[in-house]
Image (cartoon, coloured by chain):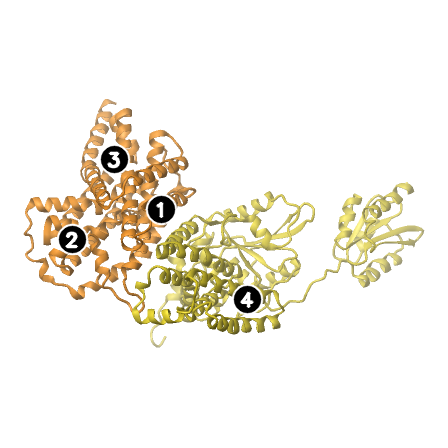
Amino acid sequence: MMKTPNERLSVNAYLVFFLVHTAQIGLGIVGVQRVIFVEARQDAWIAVLISGLWIHLIVFVICQTLKSSEHDNIFSLHTFVYGRVLGWIMNAAVVVYFLMAYTSILLGYVEMALTWMYPDFPLWGGALILVLLTVYALYGGGFRLVAGVSFLTFFMAIWIVVVVFQPLKYAEWIHLLPILEATPKQMMNGVLKTSYTMLGFEVLYIIYPFVKEKERVHRYAQLGVLLTTFLVAIVTVIAIVFFSPKQLDVTIWASLSMFTIVKFPFIERFEYIVIPLWLLVILPNLLLFMWAMTRGGKALFHIKQKYGLFIFACLSFFVAMMFEKRATINEFIDQVGWYGFWLSFVYPFFLYVFVRMKTWAKGSAK
Amino acid sequence: MWFSKKNRVDEVVKQLAHSPDFMCRRIECKGKAVSVLFLSNLINHAHLQQNVLAFIHEQEHISIEQLARCLPIGAVSICETEKEMASYIRDGWAGIYIEKEKRGLVVNIAEKVERSLEKAETESLVLGPKMSFTESIDTNIRILRQNITDQKLVTEKMTIGVRNPLDVRVVYIEDIADQTNVQTVKQRLTELQIDEVIDSSILAQLLDDHAYTIFPQYLLTELPDRLAYSLMKGRIGIFVDRSPTVIICPTTFFSFFETTEDVYLRWTMSTVLRAVRMLGIFASIFLSPLYVAVITYHYEVIPSALLLTIGESRSRVPFPPVIEALFLEFMIELLREAGARLPTKVGQTMGIVGGIVLGQAAVEAGFTSNVLIIIVALSALGSFTAPSYEMGATIRILRFPIILLAALWGLIGIFIGVSLLLIHLLKLTSLGRPYLSPMYPFRFADMKYALIRLPIKFYNERPKTNRPQNSRRFSWREAMKRKDLDE
């Protein structure tokens, strides 16, 4: 069992709101509209809401799991439930998930920035800069720094929401009709495709021991998820009414494309501001996932987080290097979404049941 | 016996032999030889004659004990060893030995050189007290005691420096300042092993939490009212002898942007002024990098009408924007540095000559564009609005790496700079306390101390950032009581 961190390292419960929210909001929201729209057509926003509801339920289950036993993070929970060997494998799976998530954000952001702004810049250069940024932050930083970054970047980026409403001038609300045309299968596919955008709340499994007031974690986590669902739903609705269906089918970064029509007296091409600013949005993602990996490394190999940081940074950089083209990166992101779907949307229920069973078995054995 | 006495005086003489101003006056008094030893440059001669020499002459019966009791001088002390005596004499005291007595007596007749109290130079205020600290620690403590008559005011004495000992005083209000902070300061001061410290700014560097950072971690002030304000809010001050600036700790990033004038002005005005200052500083760091990034990579961002103006003004400039910006920024830095080194009157002329003539000439020669001149001038102005000289300098330097990042990767480069800055600031601490407080860790109640000002009645509690033991200033309920119309 990993040691519970001391008071000096832990943070106030309200920060869970920012941590969960910024962990969820990342690259997905920039281009989520097309992905769901292809599946659920004009009911895409309903798919988002369903997926949001589902996540609220999962967050509840996660908090219940963590509360119900003395093991307050996923790594020691796994060892507790599955025993040493199988638990180790499950922990490794979690670490691999975070590695994949980290790399997908790395690739996705660099790819987006290169496509829109710097066609000539090499992919590896961009990835390297981001990896170095993560290493600089976490080396000597730790969890309090991660929480601070997610808190401050939230306020530095949230104002973009105001600008999102500007495309509504050109809205064709008729695009939303008819409502509920999608078949259950289409809707399910839509929900599935939302997963990549909404992933991130599973960091709860790891940040939980670092929060001072444990009883308030659940409330703030739910609020964070609520805000995320709300934002994703809004950008989806706006994209549906702004673009014509045929247009949306081929618009990869719908949110960015909507920003092209935003104008200020001194700024045109607003997306050129948003893409650099998006670095601040993905920064907490990068830091949180890398930090989660180092925690995992500690649980798996008993190496110091300091050294684990370098190992995982190199590893994710090399993984990122294997991708060259947009198509492969897209496929990879889909894979991450799929993996994340099973790990974060489905698995928590099973884990909860296993933990209860194991606790019960142990209790009755005594 | 006589021999040994003679040796004692000689021992002291030997220790101070290389000082030509060292005097050893021997007086014959009631058959006893009395030696008075002093460094003539350091003492008050009138004092010596009236209160020491004349007094000794008048005595009927003379001994060290009796002198120590009766000498009309405030500070006297009895010395056992010659070494001790010599060190007192070096401080401007006079030593007295009487024939056939083992111990010596030292009396304080030192006269220290110091300048008179003047107006503060580096931190200038429009409203409020103008007096500033001087180089003498005694005067400074006196000024402080005049400012704070609180009986809980503590001024603890410490000595730093092995070769050139320096008097240091840690001052705080006993029942307000956080005891952990006080302990940290004292511990760091006692652990300091160094031959000498010249000035408080050096001591501040020695006490730093982080050496490899561009940001100052301690506030240096020469304003007594600022120190008093900080102490009453729970901070700690460190006086250093021979230095006119006092160290205030722990500090946060935002405390470098506040002046006591913010407190003196009405809250509306100071809120606006603070906002102006913050905006100015923000512009000072980011305006020229933005210019470089946008002109080099993303001219699409600029609306076409504005782009035309910029394009016209840049049409004759043969350099890429980075070179242009670095050249102008360097020129401004040069002007500022030259102005700071020159005497005040010449410096002013230089500023005008440099600003107008050089700028105009640079544009006409086609070295830079008009737009950039405006931007660079603005950012220079912005950096001067920082009330703390140290922070102003930091901001000026900070601009250069961000310009380079902007030249390398455009807007993304700037945001990489922003991220690095953010992470760096989050990592910093001052005296082990977070540097970005009250922003992170977020303390809503302290925002009124850091970013905005509210009417005085809202300041019923001391800032939590300083962790005061006692945070209550006055009764909130009394201050908020609403009166009826004709009450």
Q: CA distance from mark 2 to mark 1?
A: 28 Å
Q: Which residue is mark 3?
A: A68
SS under mark 2:
loop
Query: What secondary structure is found at the residue carrying circle 4?
Result: helix
Cα separation, mark 1 vs mark 4, equals 38 Å
Query: Which-is-in-front pick, marks 2 and 3?
Result: 2
Question: Image quadrant for the C terminus of chain B?
Answer: bottom left
Residue B148: quadrant of the picture: bottom right
Q: Dot 4 falls on which chain? A: B
**Tag 2 and tag 1 share a subunit:** yes
Marked residue nearer the N-terminal end (2 or 3):
3
**Which one is earlier in the sequence, the residue at label 3 or at label 1?**
3
Q: Is residue A265 left or right of residue B49?
A: left
**Which shade is chain B?**
yellow
The reply to whether dot 2 and dot 1 touch (C-beta < 8 Å) is no
Name the front one of labels 3 and 1: 1
**Which residue was labeled with disc 2?**
A250
Reading the image, the residue beneath label 4 is B335
Looking at the image, can residue B460 be seen? no
To which chain does the residue with label 3 belong?
A: A
The chain under label 2 reads: A
Label 3, label 1: how many angstroms apart (C-alpha)? 46 Å
Residue drawn at x 16%, y 53% as measured from the top left: A250
The image quadrant that residue B130 belongs to is: bottom right
Which quarter of the image is occupied by the N terminus of chain B? top right
Viewer-side label of 2, 4:
2
